[in-house]
Image: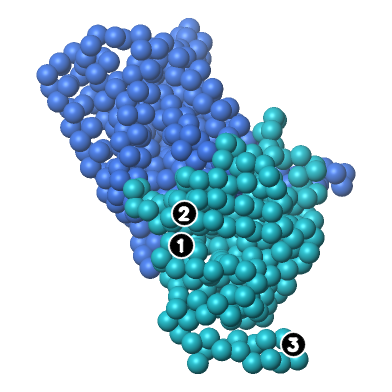
Chain colours: A cyan, B blue
Amino acid sequence: MLEIRNLSAGYSGRPVLEDICLTVPGGSVTVITGPNGCGKSTLLKALAGILPSTGTRSLCGEGLNGLSSREMAQRVAYLPQNRSVPEITVRRLVLHGRFPYLSYPRRYRREDEAIADAALERLGIADLAQRSLASLSGGQRQKAYIAMALAQSTPVVLLDEPNTYLDIGHQLRMMELARFLAREGKTVVLVLHDLTMALEWADRLVVMDAGTVLAQGTAEEVYQSGCLNRAFGVTVSRIETEQGWKYYYG
Amino acid sequence: MNSWRKFWSMNKKVMLTAAAVLLAAVLSLCLGAASLGGSMGSFIFLYVRLPRTLGCLLAGAALAVSGAVIQGVLLNRLASPSIIGINAGAGLGVTVCCAAGLLSGWAIAGAAFLGAMGAAVLIVSLARRTGASRTTVILGGVAVNAFLNALSQAVTTLVPEAGMLSGEFRVGGFSAVSYVRLIPAGVLILTALVAVFLLHNELDVLALGEETARGLGLDVQKIRLLLLLLAAMLSGCAVSFAGLLGFVGLMVPHAMRRLVGSESRVLLPLCAGGGAAFVTLCDTAARVVFAPYEFPVGIVLSVLGGPFFLTLLLKRKGGRQDA
């Protein structure tokens, strides 16, 4: 369980987040959503500790504030939205997921390679292992990066807009993977701006607007609160189907 | 024999590079205007050919690896120690050091390193201030380069004794290499090469982009500074005895990236070997082709490097923004 108390953060003097309090239960998929510029990516960065913040963050009772970036990376995997694409092989990329555990001599051990191979297997991209990252399609590249985050073997996984480069089929598989990781006991936090996707897949939904948390709870609770309409300026409705609630606009 | 075949296929490029280095060194030692026979033969070999060959190998390796590191740290494939002014900084260091009358090998190597580091820090702070646009960094580098070169010229004008460096030093060449200059610089270069290689994973992680690197627990600021320091040490020391050799740090990393990709574990040693072989061969050619006259190798490198850089610029137009 990830707990945030009174967190504030921003960029070079410009505050973006103010006094955020958030509880992210373990073993579930938490989705942070909100209109553009509401601070959801900033919140993810502050959670990952790559953006300085005030307030307290703790993981299952252990304070995260004083940890070094290496110790942090052994607990929280963070995948940003914007990444560069170096010409290295997919396997090497995934192996760099073991970077937080690298010690002397400065090379990856057999155990690291086994974990990286398992992550490749997990994402179904073992056949791409020797391909150059730059030669892959957007979807394949996304999977490679997610495999890297898995190889980090952390209890918490934070993904910023993991669906950006994916077609709808891959998006649904991405959400299934997130749910699967959560069932294995990981704390999974996703930033999504696709509201219907968020409502249908989130175990827990966090709605943000203008740097504050408007509502948090199950999709049902958040939907009933009516804050979605306020935050996004649209009307969200739903109908019950055999597969559960389906959400639509209008 | 199967294991041998496997070994060969895995290490083919490394072995070929090693063979190229060896070949270049042998050619450089054997070929030249003077004959190695006769009473002066062994003297020429020990005090002219050998230091010159060692100088070429060291400078080539240092500049190529420095280029690869700078490109990785700035996430900019057009950067290299000569283009962004790091070599010019080293040149200024050497000129000031000579003007001050400090002529020991260690003093000169140290001054070159300080000058190179100063230029590197200037460029990086510029990159951060302007939001690190790729073109801005290169343009800023061009300005820094011109500025530092002008300062060197000013010093040589005011203190003509420092002018011992003017001619060949400006374009880069190895005709004046001596052990006094070579040994301190060589020690520093070898140390920096080992240190850079130990940081090959850090360099790769840095190339994934700042946020991803931080997410993996890399202390981005510290490692970036450390790698730049090592890159400055490499090119500064090379400049201290070889002068302002241009384009090695641009051409060799590019050629090697095409060959083996950007994985630093493989790329860095190959750049070291490729740079050493390339500069040594160019220097040998510059000595032999017009014998008994010789060309400073810097001219040869610039004649090759100028068009190479332009080709890179043209190719990038409209290209994807990659690291």
Residue B297: x and y in percent read 37, 33
Q: Nearer the viewer, mark 3 or mark 2?
A: 2
Mark 2 element type: strand
Q: Residue at x 26, y 25 (%)?
A: B92
Residue that mark 2 sits on: A19
Task: Residue A250: tell me if it is visible.
Answer: yes
Please name the residue shown 44% across and 51% down the image.
A9
Which residue is identified by label 3? A243
For the residues labelled 1 and 2, say whether their Cβ atoms are less than 8 Å apart. yes
User: Is residue B252 in sight in this rendering?
Assistant: no
Q: Residues within 10 Å of mark 1 (few under 14, many from 20)?
A: some
Q: Nearer the viewer, residue B281 or B91?
A: B91
Q: Secondary structure at mark 3?
A: loop
* Drawn side of residue A15 relative to residue A120, left or right: left
Residue in the image at 87% along x and 47% along y: B2
> Please, which chain is the residue tagged with disc 3 on?
A
Q: Eyeballing the image, is A171 above or below A146?
A: below
Q: Earlier in the sequence, mark 3 or mark 1?
A: 1
Q: What chain does badge 2 belong to?
A: A
Q: Nearer the viewer, residue A158 or B71?
A: A158
Three-letter residue code for mark 2: Asp
Q: Return the residue at label 1.
A: A212
Percent coordinates x, y for residue A27 in the rendering:
74, 60
Instruction: Specify few, some or many for label 2: CA neighbours under 10 Å numbering under 14, 14-19, or 20 or more.
Output: some
Cα–Cα span, label 3 and label 2: 37 Å
The correct choice, above or below, for B30 with respect to A34 in the image is above
